[in-house]
Amino acid sequence: MRVEVVNTGTELLLGKVVNTHAGYFGQELFKLGLRIQRQTTIPDGDEIREVLEECFPRTDVILITGGLGPTSDDITREVVAEMLGLDLILDESILDTINHMFRSRGYTPSKSNDRQAMVPAGATVLENPNGTAPGLYVPANAEAGSPHLFLIPGPPRELKPMFENLIFPKMAALVGDDAIPETRNFRIYGVGESTLASTLEPLLEPIADLELGYCARLGEVDLRLIGPPEAIEAASVVVRSKYREDIIAEAEDPIEEVIQRLLDEKGETVSTAESCTGGFIAHSITNASGSSRVFHQGFVTYANEAKRDLLGVPEEVLTQFGAVSNETVIAMAEGCLRVSGADHAIAVSGIAGPTGGSDEKPVGTVHVAVASKGEDTFAKRYFNPVDRLSFKMRVTRLALDLLRRRLLGFPLD
Amino acid sequence: MRVEVVNTGTELLLGKVVNTHAGYFGQELFKLGLRIQRQTTIPDGDEIREVLEECFPRTDVILITGGLGPTSDDITREVVAEMLGLDLILDESILDTINHMFRSRGYTPSKSNDRQAMVPAGATVLENPNGTAPGLYVPANAEAGSPHLFLIPGPPRELKPMFENLIFPKMAALVGDDAIPETRNFRIYGVGESTLASTLEPLLEPIADLELGYCARLGEVDLRLIGPPEAIEAASVVVRSKYREDIIAEAEDPIEEVIQRLLDEKGETVSTAESCTGGFIAHSITNASGSSRVFHQGFVTYANEAKRDLLGVPEEVLTQFGAVSNETVIAMAEGCLRVSGADHAIAVSGIAGPTGGSDEKPVGTVHVAVASKGEDTFAKRYFNPVDRLSFKMRVTRLALDLLRRRLLGFPLD
């Protein structure tokens, strides 16, 4: 079953409002084994007709958002009725509801709202407890050559409950009881998308009906396996054997949630000593709800004096090796462990740029250390010559992944 | 000039990644007096051909994102070359750059990356310092019936700098100097978009040829004035008189840059003591290059013990008033000022949620304090009942704006 989404709304194209509808529909429909084949955004007004004419012959369902309001450029309802040759009939009960809603908020209902109570003959009204315009479901019509049409109000707080309560069940009924393909996600650290593909694809090629999807970001790749259960199981064995230590999760868990879980299991805590990441590691750890159990404090020691005064990094270390060195991050991590009383400490120091680099230590150079009670402190130099914000993000992921490996007893190097 | 956007990316349609590209382009192109007429999202793979065939005859420019990566479903480059009858030529310098980038990060370049170095004959390479795949500009081609094409990598941190530095100037040249309207941006804190509109629009109505654009996010609104210079000047006088203290910048400067400039002018520094924001304030401050001049250290004191041990918050204050109170944030800010030796300190403590709220202090409650050498410490309770990450971001903006007002000698309340 082919599904398309059409979003009408000039504000979406001007960038005033981010279009979250398509993503929301995509996530929900995936549960039914459906994928959105195309999503189109157009301004309010006449272009809806042209887009629907293009969509009708090639698709089975269209989810149309916006264009149901009271203003003159809200014309979706009228265009659909005209294209399908359906009369628009005033629905008195909708009109009553709208008028009641206006009065209860202290407004006088305006004549322009009457249009919102017009229903194409044969359409099902989708109630909207969160706004004035109801949604509409117009079943596929072979004579008019039209697919199933869902007309949905644009505001997310009206759209989402309507989709969940009324449209999703109708879509499920349209899909029927067909087997929904299984999917499994592997979140993998430190392997490029292209390396992953060229390593795995030859190995997975013999597995029938297996589909692969990739989504890379900031040092991580999401590898999605799609297919029948036995194909997914067979492929998972291969992925695990190839990338055992690099797998953050066999799911879509952010690394901070994985780390929180690992720390929770051991009843342990972590503290942070950040220079170049400027607080982003602590921010990432505390993005996971419940982080107060495993994270009690962190330090942003941007200046040398802060590294010395707060973490006890010896002046000689800073002078002899510089702030960006293994020796300094080791002293930062071990000082952080001591001062905070945590079980683990992560320390980073580097050159985020765009200025501050040298031949010996160019922009992008970073040293990361992981110290843990009763274990040798690990430290290493890395290189991430990217823009300042990406550098902070990449180094954060790197540092968190080193902690993950430490917590799992994997080698860090 | 008609502009369309085509986004390729299965992950966009699956809802794994929110499509922010169209909105970003929309905001930027508005500065050139352009509006996006249609935006289409399709999965990775073959559909790009069908969509481009539809777009070619009806539009002047297409911005195409995604599909430039190394995997087998990244085919935008090849499809465009084939549709236009252009040879794909290996660009050795791109290949060198890609291989160098891989090696410098400790990876072995894989053969599949070679495709990223292929350039359609006659296309201009758009350098990508933030990733492997360069962008491409293929000028309009009357023979092939093709409009101007920009092929842009999908990841936002690659796409945005490329658009800003390379594509925007080309678009400006295509529009022509005469047709580009003058614009001025006011970044305003703490005023809702609808309030701003209903306050300003009656006052600005008499100014001829003035157009207004709004873009709201996280407590800030960008108000864009568009029109002839004298209209912009007249409107600016009105905006300044109405919102003097709320104007972060008459430009698009992020608040952290404004703060850095103000601190630099005074030769002063700031330090941070964060609970619920978990490091995001320090992160924001250090996003501005050069922040090491004005920011030397910050504390993430998540646990009560950390507030006590690192900042000297008295145990009695924590017991009597709780961690989320004016008394605690005042003690945090003043302790931070003392320990860090900075001229100013910001402290925040609140309930980010989703759990941890109570009737008296529901999720979203936050107290913020600003302490400065030789001035009374300011503290106040605020309420931001939004999701955890939005809460951290909003509270950070709020705290930074309070510091801005302090640095400018404006009242904080």
Image: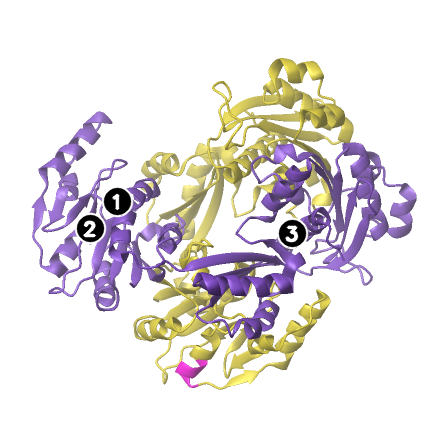
Chain colours: A purple, B yellow
**C-alpha gap between disc 1 and disc 3:** 40 Å
Q: Residues within 10 Å of mark 1 (few under 14, many from 20)?
A: some
For the residue carrying disc 3, how many other residues have a C-alpha within 10 Å: few (<14), some (14-19), or many (20+)?
many
Mark toward the viewer: 1 or 3:
1
Label 1 vs 3, first from the N-terminus: 1
Q: Give x and y (percent) for residue A315.
A: 90, 42
Q: What chain letter is assigned to the residue under label 2?
A: A
Q: CA distance from mark 2 to mark 3?
A: 45 Å
- Kindly indicate whether the residue at mark 3 contacts the one at mark 1 (C-beta within 8 angstroms): no
Sequence-first disc among 1 and 2: 2
Residues at discs 1 and 3 both on one chain: yes
Q: Position of residue B147 (x, y in %)?
A: 38, 75
Q: Secondary structure at mark 3?
A: helix
Task: State whether discs 1 and 2 lie on one chain.
Answer: yes
- In this rendering, the answer to whether A65 lies above or below B311 is below
Q: Earlier in the sequence, mark 2 or mark 3?
A: 2
Q: As shown in the figure, which amino acid type bears the numbered disc 2?
A: Tyr
Circle 3 chain: A
Q: Which residue is mark 3?
A: A397
**Residue placed under numbered mark 1 in the picture:** A166
Dot 1 and dot 2 residues touching (CB under 8 Å): yes
Locate residue A338: give its quadrant: top right
Name the mark on residue A137: 2
